[in-house]
């Protein structure tokens, strides 16, 4: 039906499902049973655990070196998984797990394998394959772009069980873990910000479980009353502003083999992400493995339900129109946005470094302090529920940006960082000296140069240049 929801049991989908299953009699039987149940009006749904094991026999993609492969998987284009990048190998081993609930039993799993190319605007395409979501170990041939040329073999294993939700159709294709994260840091950004502390030019992306369970179909649009947001999303100059912010986003969230990838399985995993890490400041090393008193800027993406954040005082924010737009890649909507900070139970004002981190209970204070998207404060209970669902072990407080308790807690966090952890005011409120180039300036110039190059190419192809003699 035009403009309607795609029918997972359409004739085309049925033919595709049987085609992918024809080489495996067991899969044919499973698909046939599912189709028979669907014909009787009983749509079968399954809960999946997919183990992406690895691949071998992939072609060399780089002139120097071999390849830096990763893959992007999706189920019926409804939910997506992006793997870690494996450096310099033609036989990557991933062993990554993906759990998805409430999937139609005749759904298809699509996988694209790519080669990460840090020096190009787009990554190289290695190949792709499609398989059913029926249970069992699978060996798939990676099909390349030319004459379906064999580009290697991919191994995976699927565990499939009947959905346990009472009404699985209410929240189909629901991501259910594990919570994966990636930490991104660019040496170029570090050079531009004149910082040796990688944490201050790092960004994190974390895939949260069950976002639709709490937010349903609710999204927060950009704030049309906010001047900075207007400069990004409307008006004749907004295209240039967006181009610069999006170029900055690509640099800050670039995926490569140097990223840190991991999963969140316990409270200690979240706490480790919040550790101060290595620091070049005097005495900073003694706090390397302690939770840092810091405020973070975050968004929850409408695109993939990912939780993206960085320290609010990060120097790469200098001169950008919006911190939240930089994280969202100028998306017109987000699920939610604001700031958050960790604190020992009751706040930083009553804390002492003589107390070890494991001796106290920890809390996360999260808010809706975002001028760009101005999230609805009535959804703060849902935000709290989402974080409690994903981060058990933390006490969660979700406060409105105008709540006096929020300002008191946030300022106590910053004051503790200044007085006891050697953090400088420049780190909390960075600025660029007159002789320094900012990330914003660098990417804006790059976007302008790219646009000028495109204009020259267009003019040379169409003969519409200024010197073509036409009036």
Image: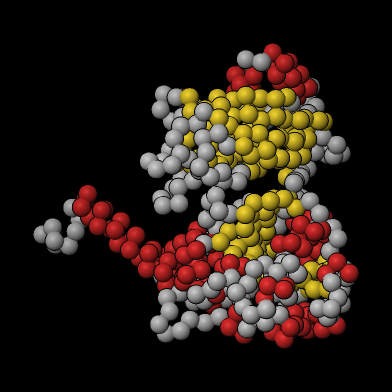
Q: Is residue 467 visible?
A: yes
253 or 463, nearer to the observer: 253
Residue 384 percent location from the top left of the image: 81, 64
Tell me what residue is drawn at x 48 percent, y 81 percent: 432
Tell me what residue is drawn at x 62 percent, y 24 percent: 139
175 or 170, nearer to the observer: 175
**Coloration mode:** secondary structure
Residue 347 percent location from the top left of the image: 83, 78
**Residue 173 picture quarter:** top right
**Residue 295 picture quarter:** bottom right
Residue lying furthest top: 25
Q: Is residue 314 above or below residue 432?
A: above
Image quadrant containing the N terminus: top right
Q: Is residue 242 visible?
A: no
- Residue 12 located left or right of residue 464: right
Q: Is residue 296 above or below residue 95?
A: below
**Residue 454 picture quarter:** bottom left
Q: Is residue 216 above or below residue 297?
A: above
Tell me what residue is drawn at x 41 percent, y 52 percent: 119
């Amino acid at each position: 039906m035009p403009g309607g929801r795609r029918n997972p049991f359409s004739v085309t989908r049925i033919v595709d499902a049987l085609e992918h299953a024809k080489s495996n009699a067991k899969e044919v039987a499973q698909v046939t049973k599912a189709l028979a149940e669907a014909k009787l009006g009983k749509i079968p749904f399954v809960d999946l655990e997919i183990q992406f094991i690895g691949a071998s026999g992939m072609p060399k993609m780089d002139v120097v070196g071999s390849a830096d492969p990763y893959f992007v998987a999706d189920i019926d284009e409804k939910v997506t998984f992006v793997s870690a990048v494996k450096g310099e190998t033609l036989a990557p081993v991933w062993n990554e797990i993906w759990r998805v609930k409430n999937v139609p039993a005749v759904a298809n799993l699509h996988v694209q394998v790519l080669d990460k190319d840090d020096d190009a605007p787009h990554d190289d395409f290695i190949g792709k394959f499609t398989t059913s979501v029926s249970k069992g170990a699978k060996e798939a041939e990676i099909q390349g772009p030319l004459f379906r040329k064999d580009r290697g073999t991919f191994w995976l294993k699927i565990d499939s069980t009947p959905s346990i939700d009472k009404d699985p159709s209410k929240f189909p294709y629901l991501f259910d873990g594990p919570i994966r994260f990636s930490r991104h840091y660019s040496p170029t950004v570090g050079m531009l910000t004149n910082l040796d502390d990688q944490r201050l030019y790092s960004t994190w992306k974390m895939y949260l479980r069950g976002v639709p369970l709490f937010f349903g179909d609710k999204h927060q649009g950009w704030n049309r009353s906010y001047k900075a947001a207007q400069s990004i999303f409307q008006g004749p100059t907004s295209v240039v502003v967006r181009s610069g912010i999006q170029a900055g986003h690509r640099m800050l969230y670039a995926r490569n083999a140097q990223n840190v990838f991991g999963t969140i399985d316990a409270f200690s995993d979240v706490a480790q992400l919040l550790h101060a890490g290595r620091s070049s400041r005097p005495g900073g090393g003694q706090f390397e493995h302690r939770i840092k008193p810091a405020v973070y800027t975050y968004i929850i993406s409408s695109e993939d339900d990912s939780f993206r954040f960085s320290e609010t005082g990060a120097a790469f924010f200098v001169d950008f129109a919006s911190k939240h737009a930089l994280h969202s890649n100028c998306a017109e909507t987000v699920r939610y946005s604001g700031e958050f900070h960790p604190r020992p139970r009751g706040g930083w004002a009553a804390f002492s470094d003589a107390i070890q981190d494991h001796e106290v209970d920890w809390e996360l204070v999260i808010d809706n302090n975002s001028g760009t998207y101005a999230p609805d404060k009535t959804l703060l209970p849902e935000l709290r529920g989402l974080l409690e669902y994903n981060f058990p072990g933390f006490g969660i407080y979700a406060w409105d940006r105008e709540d006096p308790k929020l300002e008191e807690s946030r300022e106590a966090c910053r004051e503790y960082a200044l007085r006891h952890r050697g953090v400088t005011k420049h780190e909390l409120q960075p600025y660029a000296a007159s002789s320094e180039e900012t990330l914003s300036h660098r990417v804006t110039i790059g976007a302008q140069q790219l646009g000028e190059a495109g204009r020259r190419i267009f003019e040379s192809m169409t003969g519409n240049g200024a010197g073509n003699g036409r009036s």
